[in-house]
Amino acid sequence: MSQFVWHRHNCTLNRKGVPMGGDLYQPADKAALGFLTSVMKDPDGANLDRVQVVKGWLNDAGVSEEKIFDVALSDGRTGGSVKVGNTVDLTTGKYTNTIGFPQLSVFWADPEFNPSQNAFYYVRALEIPTSRYSLLDAIELGIDVEQTGRPATI
């Protein structure tokens, strides 16, 4: 995202934005809600795989529904079904940050926005695969990770 575009969105945020957990009010023009999101990896952690927006609402029968939108993907991917890859060494449990990105920024507007529908939204960032406790336990115990009955990475 260019500096100009980021600055333009940031100026709007200062006037109309709300903090995390706040209530978003319906704009008078009934335009779709938009979210400017910028996430960074933990300095000691794994790179980022993707940013997702989770939308929840009550359908006409009063049953809650959720939909997950992949809004930013690392490594030039355009489809959320394409996996980022996996650098975990199954013999040591170590991973490398040679895939994914340290930061992802995006502006996303809800393509299914319905101004008459109450909804909640939250943003989450997913890291690249890292070692799961089952792999680290298997390495420490000197057994095959398959014996744990659990995945090696998360």
Image: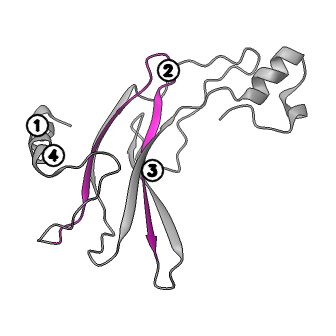
Rendered position, 117 above or below 98: below
Q: Position of residue 84 (x, y in %)?
A: 52, 36
Mark 1 or mark 4, which is nearer to you? 4
Few, some or many residues within 10 Å of mark 4 (<14, 14–19, 20+): few
Amino acid at the residue labelled 2: Thr
Provide the residue span drawn in magenta.
Answer: 30-58
Give me the disc on residue 79: 3
State left or right for residue 45 relative to residue 33.
right
Rendered position, 149 above or below 64: above
Amino acid at the residue labelled 1: His
Alpha carbons under labels 1 and 4: distance apart: 10 Å
Identify the residue under disc 1.
7
- Asked whether the residues under the numbered discs 3 and 2 touch, taking CB atoms below 8 Å apart as contact, a structural biologist would say no
Identify the residue under disc 2.
98
Q: Secondary structure at mark 2?
A: loop
State left or right for residue 132 relative to residue 97.
right
Identify the residue under disc 4.
13
Rendered position, 138 above or below 50: above
N-terminal label among 3 and 4 = 4
N-terminal label among 3 and 1 = 1
Give me the disc on residue 41: none
Amino acid at the residue labelled 3: Gly
